[in-house]
Image (tube, grey):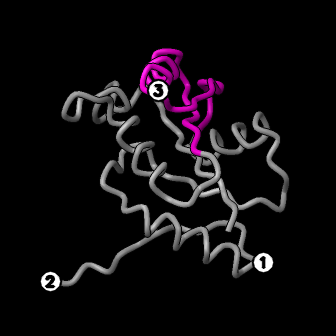
Amino acid sequence: MSFRVIIPARLSSTRLPHKPLADLHGLPMVVRVAQQAQRSAASQVVVAADDASIVQACRDHGVDALLTRRDHPSGSDRLAEACALLGCSGQEVVVNLQGDEPLMPPELINACAQMLLAQPGCVMSTAAHRIRP
């Protein structure tokens, strides 16, 4: 199974400014998210950030990162730019992992990629969990 994980990260959050750089036990949140993704079967994990401070924080901790435009209206748009910058083919599976999910199990990332590989007509998927009262 071959897939990439791209983590869109935006510095200007309205609810929590500088959220990707928020300290979680000594590391920026986005780095914690990337570390979880690196435990998956992904062939590549890349943070796609709108600010050089995020890119630098990632690189300081051995995480691949690239700078994207600031004006994207959504993380999906940031992901699309990152795919273009990375030269992703239209046939590749790319898992969009949110930059504020540091507890995402690597097994769930793998399961999402497997589902996309098994359903070639499916162009995107969102991992979800049923909430029971």
Element type where label 2 sits in the image: loop
Element type where label 3 sits in the image: helix
x and y percentages locating residue 122 in the rendered image: 71, 74
Horizontally, residue 38 falls left or right of residue 85, namely: left
Q: Nearer the viewer, mark 2 or mark 3?
A: 3
Q: Nearer the viewer, residue 114 or 128?
A: 114
Q: Which residue type carries mark 3? A: Cys
x and y percentages locating residue 92 in the rendered image: 77, 59
Residue at image point 62% right, 27% down? 66
Few, some or many C-alpha atoms within 10 Å of disc 1 (few <14, some 14-19, many ≥20)? few
Residue position for label 2: 133
Residue position for label 3: 58
Q: CA distance from mark 2 to mark 3?
A: 38 Å
Horizontally, residue 131 falls left or right of residue 56, namely: left
x and y percentages locating residue 15 in the rendered image: 29, 36
Residue at image point 59% right, 24% down? 70
Q: Which mark is residue 121?
A: 1
Q: Which residue type carries mark 1? A: Gly
Element type where label 1 sits in the image: loop
Residue at image point 39% right, 35% down? 31
- Residue 54 falls within the magenta-colored stretch: yes
Q: Which residues are magenta?
A: 45-73
